[in-house]
Image (tube, grey):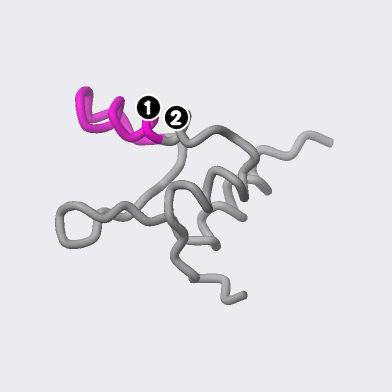
């Protein structure tokens, strides 16, 4: 798989091991308040939501506790 592969919400949720609803709520919070989403996403042509695999990998790496 390519690092900049674009994932659907369902695929991103599976990759992060969170629910689809978690990602949807994160996006809605961003849309309603303007606060940056915890999980970066792309809105393609106004409707399609996609997540970059490389962004998700960076998020997981930054969240790692040692």
Position of 37 relative to 1 (above/below):
above
Expressed as whole percent of the image width and height from the top left, the position of residue 50 reads: 37, 56
- Residue at x 64% of width, y 44% of height: 62
Secondary structure at numbered mark 2: helix
Expressed as whole percent of the image width and height from the top left, the position of residue 9 reads: 43, 48
- Residue at x 51% of width, y 56% of height: 55
- Residue at x 62% of width, y 50% of height: 15
Displayed quadrant of residue 3: bottom right
Q: Nearer the viewer, residue 19 or 64?
A: 19
Quadrant in the picture for the N terminus: bottom right
Q: Which residues are magenta?
A: 24-37
Question: In whole angstroms, how far apart are the C-alphas of marks 1 and 2?
Answer: 6 Å
Quadrant in the picture for the C terminus: top right
State the residue position of label 1.
25
The residue carrying pointer 2 sits among few (fewer than 14), some (14 to 19) or many (20 or more) residues within 10 Å by Cα, namely: few
Q: Is residue 47 left or right of residue 13?
A: left
Secondary structure at numbered mark 1: helix
Q: Is residue 26 magenta?
A: yes
- Residue at x 39% of width, y 30% of height: 26
Q: Residue furthest bottom?
A: 2
Q: Is residue 18 magenta?
A: no
In front: label 1 or label 2: 2
Position of 20 relative to 14 (above/below):
above
Question: Taken as a whole, is the magenta stretch helix, strand or loop?
Answer: helix
Label disc, if present, on residue 21 of the rendered structure: 2
Expressed as whole percent of the image width and height from the top left, the position of residue 11 reads: 53, 53
Q: Are marks 1 and 2 in contact (CB under 8 Å)?
A: yes
Q: Residue furthest left?
A: 46
Label disc, if present, on residue 10 of the rendered structure: none
Position of 15 relative to 19 (above/below):
below
The residue carrying pointer 1 sits among few (fewer than 14), some (14 to 19) or many (20 or more) residues within 10 Å by Cα, namely: few
Expressed as whole percent of the image width and height from the top left, the position of residue 23 reads: 44, 35
């Amino acid at each position: 798989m390519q690092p900049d592969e674009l994932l659907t919400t369902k695929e991103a949720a599976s990759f992060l091991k969170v629910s689809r609803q978690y990602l949807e709520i994160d996006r809605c919070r961003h849309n309603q308040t303007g606060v940056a989403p915890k999980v970066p996403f792309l809105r393609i042509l106004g409707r399609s939501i996609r997540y970059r695999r490389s962004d998700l990998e960076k998020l997981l790496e930054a969240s790692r506790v040692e």
